Image (tube, rainbow, N blue to C red):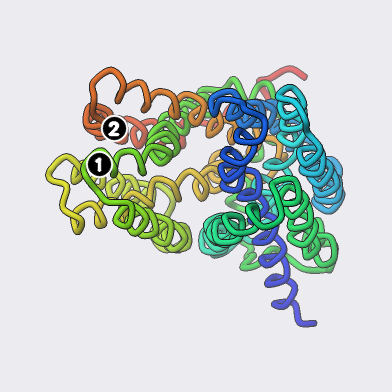
Amino acid sequence: MGKNGQYWLTVIAAFCLSANAALSSTAMGYFIVPVTAEFGYSRAEFSLFMSFMALATMIALPFVGRMTDKLGFRKVVLIGCLWSMVGFAALSFCTSLISFYVAATFLGLMCVAFSTVVAGSIISKWFAARKGFFLGIVMASTGISGTIISLILPTFIPAYGWRNAFLLLAGCTLILSLPALIFLKNKPEDLGLKPYGYVEETKKQSTATAAQADLKLSQVIFSPKFIGLYIAFVLLTIPAAGFTRQMPAFLAGIGKSPLEVGSLMSVFLIALIFAKILMGALNDAIGLIKSVAVVLLLYLISFALLPINSSFALVAVAFALMSSGGGAVGVYPPLITSEAFGQKNFATIYSALYTSTTVGTIIGTPLWGWIYDATGSYNPGIIATIPLIVVVFAIVFFSTRVRKPDARNISA
């Protein structure tokens, strides 16, 4: 196989790994109705299992990131695949609310970390050029797999039961992990290759982050740069995750029929797939900060359009543009981590930064519901999001320009 073939095999492996994330996110919503109907739980009680999963993910991410740096990709993928399969299987045998909480917590410890975080780390290590484009392709997999699973589960569960549906997800985890287990190498140097697009100038770029290489993880995490970026991604995820989960309710509230709701949500999901690829390519073409500015401007415009009127065409345009925010949460954390902190201990730092999206989701999901309950409308939150996006860009802009600490001035 030619060397270019190995790069593409690596992209395919990372694509499939990232697709695993939809199995523990998009798919979970389809179990609420059948499980609550069988056991008599309230939807709020049962839905807590997803909160336990999210909290477990947030706690585990930094540890799995460090494990990835130490053990390499393939070992972590193997551990994560087996762990997630056991977690899905455990959910299929649950008979009490507590057992659902325990099984979901177990699943959450690895299901996201070995998929999304490892996939982003793979691209960062294997690609020096066109990193944004390939990362966009990889992150688009979650939208594709989420769409496919959304077509399968609504008919599979009534026909074969929710317990078998959890086992189906376990099988999907294995299938999606196989390309990485078979073809993935920990680094291009293992095959006598350099990262795709590697040139001598890469060495000059890497010296800019050489001082950071010897810093302890705690020193990186408590640096102004890391804290600023963490806050920015929490703030961005509050609308990107929180409002996204309220979109069907928002559409129903402005008088859209069930058919129109489905059509508009399809516009958003399809646009999200392409948005991730396009923003990755945009990053390669004009640079990180300029591409972030363009993407966040589109996101700002999407919220500015919604209060104007509720026509189908205008809402469709707004939802298409809104995909830029959802895509940014997936595409930009690894790109910004690479730009701000370099490649040394990348997975460890990236996974720690990525917990910000979980924090934003935990805050944003109930916050948007509270806004509606308190005001009878989503418009106050929509309007408040506009200046919030400006704040996010300002934080990213200044955080990426904070001078890196000199390792020589830090004691061991």
Circle 2/circle 1 CB separation < 8 Å = yes
Task: Tell whether 255 sits left or right of 162.
Answer: left
- Where is residue 309, by image quadrant? top left
Residue 396 at x, y = what percent? 41, 35
Q: Which of 261 and 163 is in front in this view?
A: 163
Is residue 106 shown above or below 308?
above
The residue shown at (51%, 23%) is 224
Q: In which quarter of the image is the C terminus?
A: top right
Is residue 261 shown above or below 345?
below
Can you name the residue that lies furthest to the bottom here? 1
Specify few, some or many for label 1: CA neighbours under 10 Å numbering under 14, 14-19, or 20 or more: many
Q: Which of marks 2 and 1 is nearer the N terminus?
A: 1
Does residue 138 appear anywhere in the picture? Answer: no
Q: Mark 2 points at which residue?
A: 385
Residue 267 at x, y = what percent? 35, 59
Residue 330 at x, y = what percent? 52, 47
The residue shown at (76%, 38%) is 91
Q: As shown in the figure, which amino acid type bears the numbered disc 2?
A: Thr
- Where is residue 349, by image quadrant? top right
Does residue 190 appear anywhere in the picture? Answer: yes
What SS does tag 1 mark?
A: helix
Q: Name the residue under label 1.
A: 303
The residue shown at (45%, 38%) is 241
